[in-house]
Image (tube, rainbow, N blue to C red):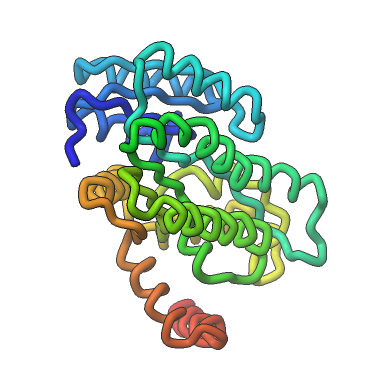
């Protein structure tokens, strides 16, 4: 699969993996349509793509807003005439126990992490099916494979993205439309810094400490993550794991599907000594 002369759509493109994907597509010769709620960051992404000599279309879009996403899809198709790749990347996180979680946090994270992916898929998929070509790529997480304390809300959305995407892949088997689910491990982005932080696994409410721990563990850069996703699209891979940590955790989950947290908890306690 080649990218030159094609059109790629990336949600959550104002920073992190989204911006790196927009730039990566442009470097490979694709034109890009990007959206986010962060208009300042989106403008910076636009300038980076334009410096590479590619066309770029931008809109401020809240992916939890169904009508806004479908309107964005209509504008993109009118502007470019086609869409070849869609990466539903926009995402947020909440750290809290299920017991103490607030319904407004559930509404917020499900609206963006799950409904945002559904909206982006449904808005562009009919065009791809009609042309019998293209790629739908939905970003889950390693937390769509393993579940950990205080990440129940995030886990719920990322497991849901995985389930919906894998079902879609089976439904489109034998067609020209490629479907992939992405499971990043620790990526050095702003997702934890921008999270709604209520409680850490150790029971504390210190967000700064959680951000520091995450940044220490996040060994993969957004650019490296984007390169892995783009290679996965080129190879039409159905599941894209990003980072050595994601690959290791996936293996542990497969070998101990019920007891993996017991194993991981002991390993973390050993590392923190």
**Above or below, 57 relative to 232:** above
Residue occupying image coordinates x 30% and y 48%:
229
Q: Residue at x 60, y 61 (%)?
A: 155
Residue drawn at 49 percent across, 19 percent down:
40
**Left or right of residue 46: residue 1:** left
Instruction: Check the image and name the residue furthest to the top.
Output: 79
Residues 177 and 44: in front is: 177
Asked if residue 104 can be seen in this view, the reply is: yes
* Image: 9 above or below 17: above
Residue 237: x and y in percent read 29, 56
**Which quadrant of the structure image shows residue 91?**
top right
96 relative position to 121: left or right: right
As rendered, which of 21 and 188 lies closer to the eye?
21
Instruction: Tell me where residue 23 appears, x and y as whole percent.
Output: 28, 30
Residue 103 is situated, as x and y percent measured from the top left of the image, at 82, 50
Q: Residue at x 65, y 24 (%)?
A: 67
Percent coordinates x, y for residue 4 in the rendering: 17, 28
Quadrant occupied by the N terminus: top left
**Is 32 in front, or is 123?**
123
Answer whether residue 209 is visible to the viewer in this image.
no
């Amino acid at each position: 699969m080649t990218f030159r002369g094609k059109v790629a759509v990336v949600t959550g493109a104002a920073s992190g993996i989204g911006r790196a994907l927009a730039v990566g597509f442009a470097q490979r010769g694709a034109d890009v349509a990007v959206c986010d709620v962060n208009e300042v960051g989106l403008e910076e992404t636009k300038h980076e793509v334009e410096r590479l000599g590619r066309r770029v279309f931008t809109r401020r879009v809240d992916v939890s807003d169904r009508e806004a996403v479908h309107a964005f899809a209509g504008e993109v198709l009118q502007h470019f005439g086609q869409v070849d790749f869609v990466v539903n990347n926009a995402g947020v996180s909440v750290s809290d126990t299920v017991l103490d979680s607030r319904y407004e946090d559930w509404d917020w994270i499900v609206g963006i992490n799950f409904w945002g992916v559904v909206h982006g898929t449904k808005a562009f998929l009919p065009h791809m099916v009609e042309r019998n070509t293209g790629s739908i790529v939905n970003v889950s997480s390693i937390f769509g494979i393993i579940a950990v304390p205080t990440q129940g809300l995030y886990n719920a959305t990322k497991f849901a993205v995985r389930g919906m995407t894998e079902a879609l892949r089976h439904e489109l088997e034998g067609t020209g439309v490629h479907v992939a689910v992405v499971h990043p491990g620790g990526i050095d982005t702003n997702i934890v810094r921008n999270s709604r932080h209520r409680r850490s696994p150790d029971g504390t409410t210190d967000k700064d400490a959680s951000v520091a721990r995450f940044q220490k563990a996040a060994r993969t850069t957004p650019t490296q993550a984007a390169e892995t996703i783009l290679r996965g699209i080129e190879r039409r891979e159905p599941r894209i794991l990003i980072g050595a940590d994601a690959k290791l955790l996936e293996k542990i989950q497969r070998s101990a599907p019920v007891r993996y947290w017991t194993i991981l908890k002991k390993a973390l306690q050993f590392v923190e000594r």
